[in-house]
Image: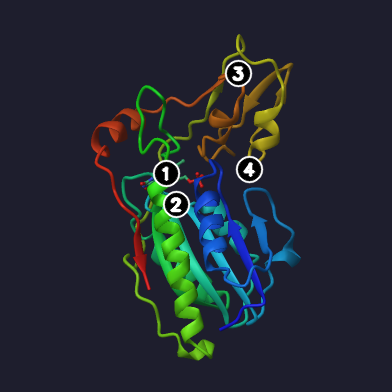
Amino acid sequence: MNNKKISAIYYSPTHTSAKICSVVARAVNSTGIDVNYCELTYKAEEDKLHFTSDDLVVVSVPVYCSRVAPVAIERLAKIKGNNTPAIAIVVYGNRDYGDALLELCDVLKEKGFVTIAAAAFIGEHSYSRTNMPIAQGRPDDADVVAATVFGEKCRVKLDACHNIADFLQLKVDGNTPYFVVNHSAPTAPTIDVNLCNQCGVCIDNCPVEAISYQNGAVMCNVDLCTKCCRCVKECPHNAVKFITPYTELLHKNCAVRREPQIFM
Ligand SMILES: Cc1cc2nc3c(=O)[nH]c(=O)nc-3n(C[C@H](O)[C@H](O)[C@H](O)COP(=O)(O)O)c2cc1C
């Protein structure tokens, strides 16, 4: 199948899902056409999310609590395919991806896509800190090679098929009903007033507009915050902290390197 347009669609607060998405989209693109990038980390333009059977989409999202990150699900609500081939990818922080890949494949099916291949990749955990790293630096060079090989295999699979109906239903790991997330008490990052110079990087970067100026200081709204840690990682002054017992727990228990898993 020759796709006239390839789109890389991702929700990626700390950039790991974005990186894998771009690598796979470039590798699957044998014709050299421009890849169309669609970043759902901010509210996307709706018209960018409508696709035909001539398109190929690569969709990559992070795993939160063994499921697709809820904001990614919200933003994918606008996506629409029409027998459009899709490559589904979840990126997780070296603990487990649970039912997230199955959930993403189900969403894509419901929205009119035919998932031809899927994969789970590993990204540095949002809660990873320099003194307690969790999958630090991932996706690394080996992951990029794996993502490139995956993209090339997808191209071979697409080229071998002449009709979208030739693709059999893909089976991925995961269970239904999906894992039910038990939401703990809301928490949010704090901003150290001694380090913060109110540059606004955290305000501009928050995917859900949870950070704002309040009474002359930068504050995070605990009810809106999704704990994605984009603000922690983007702050040029190290002023934003998100302290959670999960950092130590994951650092201790998820130290063994996990490898990407692909489903073709
Ligand atoms: C609220 C929250 C929940 C998470 N849950 C999981 C999880 O269940 N399993 C896991 O391995 N990683 C988990 N992670 C880590 C992310 O999946 C991982 O860091 C991913 O690379 C983030 O993607 P991004 O860089 O595209 O934002 C979680 C992160 C956050 C913020």
Query: What's the CA distance linking mark 3 and mark 1?
Result: 25 Å
**Foreground of the two, 229 or 121:** 121
- Residue 144 badge: 2
- Residue 140 badge: 1
User: The residue under label 2 is which amino acid type?
Assistant: Val
- N-terminal of the pair, mark 3 or mark 2, is 2
Mark 2, mark 4: which one is toward the viewer?
Answer: 2
- Residue 196 badge: none
- Determine the residue positioned at 50% across, 80% down: 158
Query: What's the CA distance linking mark 2 and mark 1?
Result: 6 Å
Query: What's the CA distance linking mark 3 and mark 4?
Result: 20 Å
Q: Secondary structure at mark 1?
A: loop
Which residue has dot 3 on it? 237
- Residue 207 badge: 4
User: The residue under label 1 is which amino acid type?
Assistant: Asp
Query: What's the CA distance linking mark 3 and mark 2?
Result: 30 Å
- N-terminal of the pair, mark 3 or mark 1, is 1
